[in-house]
Amino acid sequence: MSQALSKDMQIKTSVDLKPYNSLAISAVAEYFCSVNDIDQLRNALIFAHNNNLQITPIGGGSNIIIASDLAGLVLHINLLGVEVISSDADAIKIRFAAGENWHSMVTYCLDNGWYGLENLALIPGDIGAAPIQNIGAYGVELCDFVYSVEVIERATGNLKKLSVADCEFGYRTSVFKQAAKDCYIITAVTLTLSKHPKTNTDYPSLRASIDSDHPSPQDIFQAVCHIRRNKLPDPKDIPNVGSFFKNPIVTKEVADRLAQDYPELPIYAYSQSQCKLAAAWLIEHCGFKGCRKGDVGVHSKQALVLVNYQGDGAAVLALAEEIQSKVLQIFAIELHVEPRIYGNLI
């Protein structure tokens, strides 16, 4: 059953969302629509408003957990397009529509001699989701390159352009997860990239995997891809959403206490008064690495990755809660889930 809203768009009912999420959890959307342009997106928002429907936007599905069937309208954001906004001898501003694949975009930029994103290679998902949690890896964060983020207001259908300051980026967070949660749908992201190679090898595991003392951006890209492929399972082979928990940010006093009790615990400077802990080490120390609980488990090569063999959302979240409880019990540290959870547990 479907309801036509425009020439190329339909609102469908009772759609299985399993193909749209990397954890391969089967759940049904009450209404579903894939939008390819702004007019279709506006029409979908009008449909939801007129029918008093909750809206759930999704992209590549690489950072969501669907815990149950979803009431309301699930919007698949399939906006595509790449546009150079400005360019000079030193830098380029390039606009990517929200539905463009992140890793393909990183490869595209590198191939064109636009540098800075190499450390963020092979992160799954679409670019529209990247600003929401300010994706980061191997010493680099998205916010270092964002010029602006274009959004559409859910309530009005109006388009807005947000600056970096407007986005309120932080460690794995942004205004889209905080003050403006559920207010906007991201439609495009404009990045400022350098035309001169500027490599970052500060992250220990990345530095250790590169032979050259003066690596090129291509060297960084290849090394990051190699590391990620070796330790992270491909969601197409083993359903997962990548890092399930954030690395905890703690005060230096807490970090000093833990370093005294657990000298092998990796601890990184985060600010003048805070440190970042390796969540994977905490989880592994609690004995969860490689474990299996029924139809879900923890990956054997990376304790931050929860995998789904044939389980449902409830099973995945039950394992996550067990891990959180054990880490809190042993280290007095709270682990926070990184992906977004949709639906309700019964």
Image: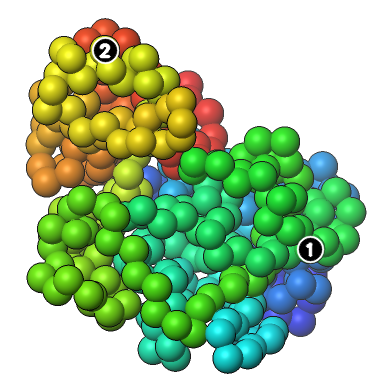
- In the figure, is residue 303 to the left or right of 68? left
- In the figure, is residue 256 to the left or right of 110? left
Across the whole image, how many numbered discs are drawn on residues?
2
- Residue 189 position (above or below residue 277): below
| Residue at the spot of label 2 | 257
- The Cα–Cα distance between marks 2 and 1, rounded to whole angstroms, is 44 Å
- Residue 9 position (above or below residue 302): below
Q: Residue at x 22, y 75 (%)?
A: 214
Task: Please identify, in this view, whether the residue under mark 2 or under mark 1 is nearer the observer.
Answer: 2
Classify 10 Å Cα crowding around label 1: few (below 14), some (14-19), many (20 and above). Answer: some
Image position, residue 74 (x, y; %)? 62, 52
Q: Quadrant of the N terminus?
A: bottom right
Who is closer to the viewer here, 84 or 11? 84
Mark 2 lies on a secondary structure that is helix
Residue 321 visible? The answer is no
Which residue type does callout 2 highlight?
Arg
Which residue type does callout 1 highlight?
Lys
Q: Residue at x 13, y 58 (%)?
A: 208
Image position, residue 200 (x, y; %)? 34, 63
- Residue 35 position (above or below residue 48): below
- Quarter residue 277 falls in: top left
Q: Residue at x 45, y 42 (%)?
A: 339
Who is closer to the viewer here, 342 or 109? 109
Residue 275 visible? The answer is yes
Who is closer to the viewer here, 137 or 342? 137
Q: Residue at x 87, y 61 (%)?
A: 158
In the rendered structure, are the residues bearing label 2 and label 1 in contact, judged by CB atoms less than 8 Å apart? no
Image position, residue 117 (x, y; %)? 42, 69
Image position, residue 230 (x, y; %)? 13, 59
| Residue at the spot of label 1 | 161
